Amino acid sequence: MPFTIATWNINSVRLRIGLVEQFLGAHAPDVLCLQETKTLDDAFPRKALEAAGYAHIAIAGQKGYHGVAIASKHPFKTVERDDWCAMGDARHLRVSFEDDLIVDNFYVPAGGDEPDPAINPKFAHKLKFLRELAQWGDRRRRSDTRAIMVGDLNVAPHEHDVWNHKQLLKIVSHTPVETDLLGQVFAAHDWVDAVRHFVPLRQKLYSWWSYRAADWDAADRGRRLDHVWVTPALKDGLVSTSTLREARGWDRPSDHVPVLVTLER
DNA sequence: ATGGTGGGTACCCCA
């Protein structure tokens, strides 16, 4: 049975629940992982997702900032939430399914504007979060573990994950210290980039375009900040991927678009 | 070199 997972930084799930419903109606992933839900759990639009066929919902919210959620057509076996950098932020959820498939959903700190941890505490926090992720990856996992890691990792790791590699080297999300650290996270578990598995590294691909550009589509100054990684046990089952650029042009859009991966589980 | 827009919240935080 093919299984489709989607990840989407929604930038307020309450404001954009209509877009979420539209997306689910059109693409019907088995599992949708959201970031930046920006709402307390009590105010999460649970009923709308249930009505769309997603009866199983895991939420980690906080007031105003951050917040992640996982909505699923299939029941969870376990739901866990880790605290990263001992900040108490709602930036992570892990669920498993009856067949022991694991899904981790992350919202990595954006890191502010100044890429210097000595003067920018937000950037220091981001680097610490990525170092913890690399350590987390060090935990020994069985070679047959079937796990998927998704989320807004707020790092565009490769040259063609940004519109201008040379110019972005000084910009938070594409600085060498960040891309090196994300590389360590990636290597720690022998992850497979399920999107780049299908889209060659030489081809530009973005999942985020700033709200500040006058014409995001024409300027096309995007970055690929949203990722879907799988363990080697799932690699041979990878079927397809899509990054829904058109969603950036929807009415009152998120600045991120959904990224989907289909695989045989 | 600068400032641009869009969330949340409560007059300022964050992306």
Image (spheres, coloured by chain):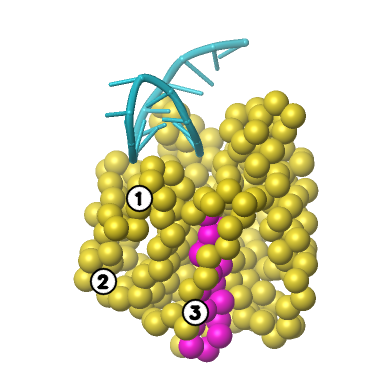
Residue A101 forms part of the magenta stretch: yes
Tell me which amino acid carries mark 2.
Glu
Disc 3 is placed on an element classified as: strand
Establish if A135 lies above or below A170: below
Q: Which mark is residue A50?
A: 2
- Percent across and percent down for residue A99 are 52, 89
Q: Residue at label 3?
A: A78
Mark 1 or 2, closer to the camera: 1
Q: Which chain is cyan?
A: B
Establish if A118 lies above or below A46: above
- Distance from disc 2 to disc 3, alpha carbons, whole Å, reads 19 Å
- Distance from disc 1 to disc 2, alpha carbons, whole Å, reads 18 Å
Q: Residue at label 1?
A: A39
Tell me which amino acid carries mark 1.
Thr
Disc 1 is placed on an element classified as: loop
Disc 2 is placed on an element classified as: helix
What is the magenta segment's predominant secondary structure?
Answer: strand
- Percent across and percent down for residue A4 are 46, 74
Q: Colour of chain A?
A: yellow
Question: Along the horizontal axis of the image, is A168 left or right of A180?
Answer: left
- Percent across and percent down for residue A92 are 53, 60
| Crowd band around label 2 with a 10 angstrom C-alpha radius: few (<14), some (14–19), many (20+) | some
Q: Chain of mark 2?
A: A
Question: Along the horizontal axis of the image, is A16 left or right of A245?
Answer: left
Residue name at image x 70 percent, y 44 percent: A127
Q: Quadrant of the C terminus of chain A?
A: bottom right
Q: Chain of mark 3?
A: A
Magenta segment: A91-106
Q: Which mark is residue A226?
A: none
Tell me which amino acid carries mark 3.
Thr
Viewer-nearest residue: A227 or A136: A136
